Image: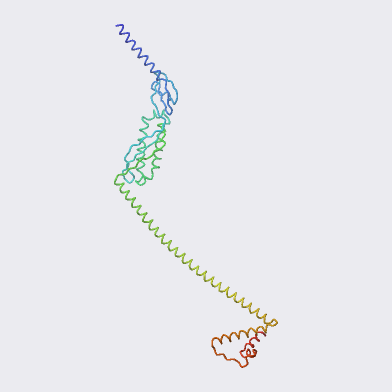
Amino acid sequence: MNTIFSIFNLLVWGSVILILISKFIRSIRLVPTKYAYIVERFGKYHSTFYAGFHAMLPFIDKVEYIMDLKEETIDVPPQECFTFDNVKVEVDGVTYISVMDPVKASYGITNHREAAIQLAQTTTRSIIGTLELDKTFEERDSISNAVVRVLNEAGETWGIKVHRFEIKNISPPATVTGAMEKQVSAEREKRAVVSRSEGEMQSMINRSEGMKIELINRSEGEMQRRINEAEGWAQEILQLAKATATSIENLSQAITSEGGKEAVQLQLSEKWMDQFKKLAKEGTNVVLPMNLLSLDNMLRDIGLKTVANKEID
């Protein structure tokens, strides 16, 4: 009997010692980086342990909550929403939050993650309800910004901060999708037809402009050619006139100089003899004066000397 009692006492005291050792060990905490431990004393909030070595009072202090301070990615499940034009769409998204105040996140809300998801869904539904279907695809940024703003207003009480909210998918019904694809195809075909017509119109305009420029260049070239020819003729006539005037002036000076008259008479006589030879070779009948030995008489008979005397005088 004493042996049994001794064994029982040994077991009891051993258990007590193990419990004490366990409590003393658990009263020493090493908090990792980006974590916060919420410590309660007698069931009431006492302190917050951040990264590092911390000691607590055994049996008195207790770590009630462990908060992860890193940024979290939380999926927002798909939900059905109705647009302003009564089209049902399915919307899902993802939000990025982090705990800024671990005490508020522990005591200010039961589950801050679930609360953020629910508020994101309700806010998304209310915003999409004010937009038409076509606008929901264009206004993703405004929807995301509105959800972030509403979540941050509530997050001040919950001790969290919402960094971003992104809409992953906006899925309308199959019938609406088919109608939208047909509309897009029609718009593309319309733009293609307009582009082709504008291209053809521009091509015709370019061709007509080219023909116009070509005709203008040809007419200007013809006009310039005629002007150049006229100027060339004028220069030629002017040069001939100047040469003739110079020749006449030189001839008159030669005639009035000493021996000029005799030279003129000699030249006229030579020209007359050359003409006479030419006529004789051609077989033309020529009437000659009786006295061929007298050149003066021959010149006087044909009037050459009379003309020469007039020019000399």
| Rendered view: 36 above or below 162 | above
Quadrant (top left, top right, bottom left, bottom right) of the N terminus: top left
Quick one: which residue is furthest to the right in this view? 258
| Camera-side residue of 175 and 106 | 175
Q: How many marks?
A: 0
Q: Position of residue 293 (x, y in %)?
A: 64, 90
| Camera-side residue of 67 and 222 | 222
Quadrant (top left, top right, bottom left, bottom right) of the C terminus: bottom right
User: In terms of image quadrants, where is residue 254?
Assistant: bottom right
User: In terms of image quadrants, where is residue 276?
Assistant: bottom right
Quick one: which residue is furthest to the bottom in this view? 290
Q: Position of residue 305 (x, y in %)?
A: 64, 88
| Rendered view: 29 above or below 309 | above
| Rendered view: 15 above or below 1 | below
Q: Position of residue 61 (x, y in %)?
A: 40, 20
Which colour style is shown? rainbow
Quick one: which residue is furthest to the front in this view? 281
| Camera-side residue of 203 and 17 | 203
Q: Position of residue 101 (x, y in %)?
A: 42, 30
